[in-house]
Image (cartoon, helix red, strand yellow):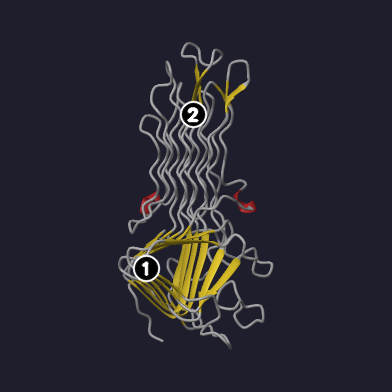
Amino acid sequence: MPCRGTLIASCVLLGGCARVFGLSSVADDGSGAIDAGSDARTSPCWAFDPANYAPCDADFPVALAALDLSQDGAMSTAAVELYRDTGMVLLRFPSIHIAAGATFTIFDDRPVIVATDGDIQIDGTFVIAPTTTTNGECSANSVMGVSGTNTSPGGGGGSYGALGGLGGTSSGGGPQVAGSVNGKRSLVPLRVGCPGGRSGDAKASNAVIVINGSNGGRAGGALELSAQGTLTVGGLGAVLANGGGGAGGKTRIASNCGPNAHNCTSGGGGGGSGGALLVEATHVLLAGSVCAVGGGGGSGGLGGQGGNGTPTDGSPGALSLSCAGGSGGGATVAGGNGGDTGAARSGGDAGGGGFDSGGGGGGGIGRIRVIGHPDLVSSGTVTPIPMN
């Protein structure tokens, strides 16, 4: 089978024609965030041997009605039973078409597999919403700020395929580191990203907590799109699993706060990391965008008489073809921007210091895997991009 497609820089023979982005194998060594290539594996009842589900087994679900969406729509799969004991949800459709200008969003805190007997055509936008839950691997990768007197540092950005940004410093402490790169590049099993860290509490001079820390951004969700036919992301189409923005810091005036200003401030929450996207089909044609980018950190609370200025939340990763990470909130004590591409794979570090509380760090990129069984052709944008 000849190798073709602009997505892959080189063709590596791995028991067939396999094109691998930045890899010579799919070993899970923690470096990089994307694996894209071809795979000639076969299945006795399916066009290929898919990741994370078994179409030949008796518990493979009956197909729902075909999904043909010409306007915005959403689906919550929270009531759907888990597929076996995998921790994942499996949905089966005959085919899917998202028309240009339409956005289809799935809400579920668990990883979601969407399999089709036929084609998936995405000319609009297919979104897996940021998740409100976390997982064990994130416990050390969504770092909270520590409590401080009068001010507090921002929370670290969530880490997944790359590091989250540092939470900003304050007179109360910091900076808050953002954990380590985690998860498997194979995305087997499929897994959501990591949320941003909560900022530290602000205490008055009598050690009483005056302001609770601000929440970190939600982690990017996890989605597998698996088509037995052709999976096409058109030139204006996008598949997104982006992280959420961290909440901005807070200010409260109290008699025991600050030497003269009589206010305490809290830091901003860290941005959530990008999530996970696994895209596979007999034929994969990518002309649009496939994105799993981080959310921006919230801005820190501002010190000074009366708490000048209004802290702002960080923004989520862009719901657009740009694959841009979320912008950090604020200007004076800005949160870090979310990671997206190139040198910005990791979340941006946040500002802070003095009588101001620190901003939240930006969330790092997520993880993406794209597999053609055996054909993969792309002229589109896949972010995160591979490690060199």
Q: Is residue 183 above or below residue 233?
A: above
Marked residue nearer the N-terminal end (2 or 1): 1
Q: Quadrant of the C terminus?
A: bottom left
Q: Note whether residue 150 is visible.
A: yes
Question: What residue is pinned by disc 1?
Answer: 70
Question: Along the line of sight, which residue is nearer the eye, 317 or 170?
Answer: 317
Q: Nearer the viewer, mark 2 or mark 1?
A: 1
Q: Is residue 258 above or below residue 199?
A: above
User: For the residue labelled by badge 2, is the local secondary structure a helix, a strand or a loop?
Assistant: loop
Q: Is residue 74 above or below residue 346?
A: below
What mark, if any, has residue 115 been given in the picture? none
Q: Give the image quarter of residue 29.
A: bottom right
Determine the residue positioned at 60% across, 51% down.
Answer: 134
What mark, if any, has residue 250 been given in the picture? 2
Three-letter amino acid code of the residue under disc 2? Lys
* Rendering coords of residue 11 (x, y %): 40, 76
